[in-house]
Image (cartoon, rainbow, N blue to C red):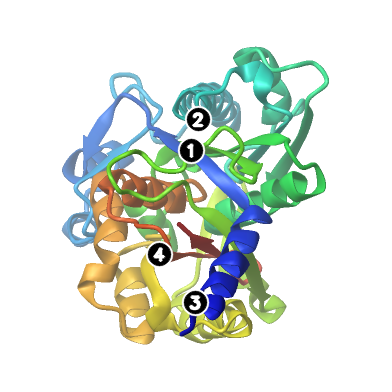
Amino acid sequence: MSITEGALTLSSESLTRAAAPALLSCATAVPPRRFSQEEAFALCGYSSSRIRQIFLNSDIDFRHFWLNPDDFIPNETPDQLHARYLEGARHLAGLAARRALDQAGLAASDIDCILVASCTGYLCPDLSTLLVSDLGLRCDIQRGALLGHGCAGALPLLQRASDHARANPGARVLAIAVEICSACYFFDTSMETIIGNAICADGAAAFVLSLNGRSAPASNGNGAAAPPCVLGFQSVLDPSQLDKVGFEHRDGKLRIVLAAEIRELAGPIIDRCLDSLLLPRGLRRDDVRFWVLHPGGRKVLDAASQFLGLAEENLRFSRRILREFGNMSSPTVLFVLDEVRRSGEPHPGDYGVLLALGPGFAAEAALLRW
C-alpha cells in the first residue's frame, strides 16, 4: 500500500468514527441480596428432585433478586409484584445511571435525553420520567420508554439513543435497561415456567452515548482503546413465531413464554441478522474480535457457539456473566459489554458485535469499533 493509499484509508476510518456515536460509559447494578441456585430453588417453592437438577445444571452459580427471603412467599398478589417492580426498578436504574454518569465524567445536568427499556413491569408516569426527579436531571430533558422487547431490549435502546445523538450533534444520551424478573414470578410445573424461574434474575445497566465521543478520552493512557463507536444496527423479525417467546397475562400476573422451538429457530435468524449487518460493510465474521452475546441460558450459548462456529474463548465473557448473574433479560448483554470493557482487552480498530434474541420473534445486533 502506498503512502497516499494509507492516508486515504486512515482518513476514511477517521471520518467513519467522527460520524458515529461513541459509548462514553457502561455501568451495571444488581440488588444487594445474592442467592445460590440451591437457595433459589428452595425460595421458589419447588420440591421435585428433577426440577432441582434443572436449577443446578444451568451453568449459573448465583443470581440477585430484589426481595427479602425472610418475608417472601411464592404466591404473591399482582399488587405485591407491582410494588416490587416499582421499588426495585427505580432503585437499580438510578444506581446504574449514577455509575454511568460518574464513569463518563458528567453531571446529571449534562444529559439531554434519557431513555429506558424494560419489559417486566408497567409504570405511568414511566420510569424515565420518575428518574428525572431521582437523578436531578434537567426539566427540559427529552425522554422515552421502550417496552416489551424482552431479552433483546438493550439493542433497540442503543439504536434509539444513537438515533437521537445523530439527530442532535453534541447531545448526550443516558440510556438504561432494567428488569425485575422476580416481579414476574409465576408458579406452575410447566417446563417453560420452571426454566424461567431457574435462570431469570434482576439487574440494570446504563450507558452514556454522544456523537463524536464528546467528553471521552482518546484512550486510557495504557494502550487500551478509546470508547467504542456504534457503526450500525440490524434487526430481523419473524412474525410467524410471535407466540414462541415473551410474556402472557394469567391471573393478573406476567407468566413467561419460552417455547422449546426457540433453539431450532435461533440459528437461521441469527445467520440472516449477522449477514445483513456485516456483509454490506465488507466484513466477515472472522473480522469480529469480541462477540457480546446475550447469555439467554446455557443451551442458548451452546447453540450459538455451534451454529456460529465460535471457539469457547469467544464466549468467555457471556458465560461468566451467566454464571455470576443469570439471565436478567434486557440489561444482560450490557453486563457482557461492561465485562469486555473492564477486561482492558479491546484495542484500537477491534470490532465487536452485540447480539440478542427477543420477542417478535426477533434477532437484534449492533456493530461496534474501538
- Inspect the image, locate mark 1, and give the three-letter code of the amino acid beneath it: Ser
- Inspect the image, locate mark 3, and give the three-letter code of the amino acid beneath it: Ile
* Residue depth check, mark 4 versus mark 1: number of the one nearer the observer: 4
Front residue of this view, candidates 48 and 35: 35
Cα distance in 3D space between marks 2 and 4: 21 Å
- Residue 256, image x, y percentages: 52, 55
Front residue of this view, candidates 273 and 250: 273
- Residue 15, image x, y percentages: 65, 61
- Which element type, helix, strand or loop, lies under badge 3? helix
Mark on residue 104?
A: 2
Is residue 359 something one can see in this rendering?
Answer: no
| Point 41% across, 55% down: residue | 196
- Which element type, helix, strand or loop, lies under badge 1? strand
- Residue 150, image x, y percentages: 57, 54
Residue to which mark 4 is pinned: 350
Residue to which mark 1 is pinned: 25
Q: Earlier in the sequence, mark 1 or mark 3?
A: 3
Q: Earlier in the sequence, mark 4 or mark 1?
A: 1
Residue to which mark 3 is pinned: 3
For label 2, the crowd category at 10 Å Cα-Cα, with few meaning under 14, some 14 to 19 and many 20 or more, is many
Cα distance in 3D space between marks 4 and 1: 17 Å
